[in-house]
Amino acid sequence: MRIHQHRRFVFVALALALALPAGAQTPQNLHAGVTRVEVFANMAMSVTPASAPDYRHPYQLSIYRLDAMNQIRDIASAGMPRDEAGARRWLAANEARIRRQVQPMVASAVNGILLARRYRIDRLPAVVVNQRYVVYGHTDVDQALAALRMSRQPGR
């Protein structure tokens, strides 16, 4: 390795070491013992990691948008005529499609609301870990897990 490349490598390694806080959790440590994560947020909040099919995480992840019923209402009524007779005809023609489209969304929204009440969630965002611990203020799951780990360390 040339001297210039070696210095650059040392600089990058030093910068990374300084960027990580002392006792920073590695992903393996961060996720140790975590089997289920539930995120409660509204539609305006960006949740990380998103529940993308190509993202692999070592726990079951569920994301509940507690204001999803507003979006469902908008989807169900999009394109509906304003007059009553036209709305009835439109609904008769589109009812099956609307049911297919919104039924899973309604089930998820209702389930999220019921779970939020069960966990006594009183503000958003909230991350529930293993159906036991509630962490407020984070939409990034790894940050929430790190905050939980820090709060559970002895002496804190």
Image (cartoon, rainbow, N blue to C red):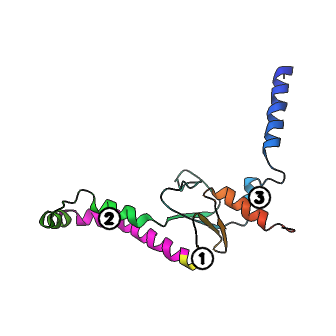
**Whether label 3 touches label 1, CB < 8 Å:** no
Q: Secondary structure at mark 3?
A: helix
Badge 3 amino acid: Asn
Q: Secondary structure at mark 1?
A: loop
The C terminus lies in quadrant: bottom right
Crowding at dot 2, Cα within 10 Å, few <14 / some 14-19 / many 20+, comes out as: few
Q: Position of residue 113 (x, y in %)?
A: 49, 73
Badge 2 amino acid: Arg
The tag on residue 29 is: 3
Q: Which residue is mark 2?
A: 100
Q: Is residue 32 visible?
A: no
The N terminus lies in quadrant: top right
Query: In 3D space, how far apart are the residues under numbered discs 2 and 3 (Cα atoms)?
Result: 41 Å
Mark toward the start of the polypeptide (3 vs 1): 3
**Whether label 2 touches label 3, CB < 8 Å:** no
Residue depicted at 56% across the width and 79% down the height: 118
Residue 141 highlighted magenta (yes or no): no
Q: Is residue 5 left or right of residue 34?
A: right
Q: Is residue 98 left or right of residue 38?
A: left
Provide the major secondary structure of the magenta segment: helix
Q: Which residue is mark 1?
A: 119
* Front one among 74 and 90: 74
Closer to us: mark 2 or mark 1?
1
Q: Is residue 83 left or right of residue 111?
A: left
Image: magenta residue range = 93-116
* Front one among 19 and 2: 19
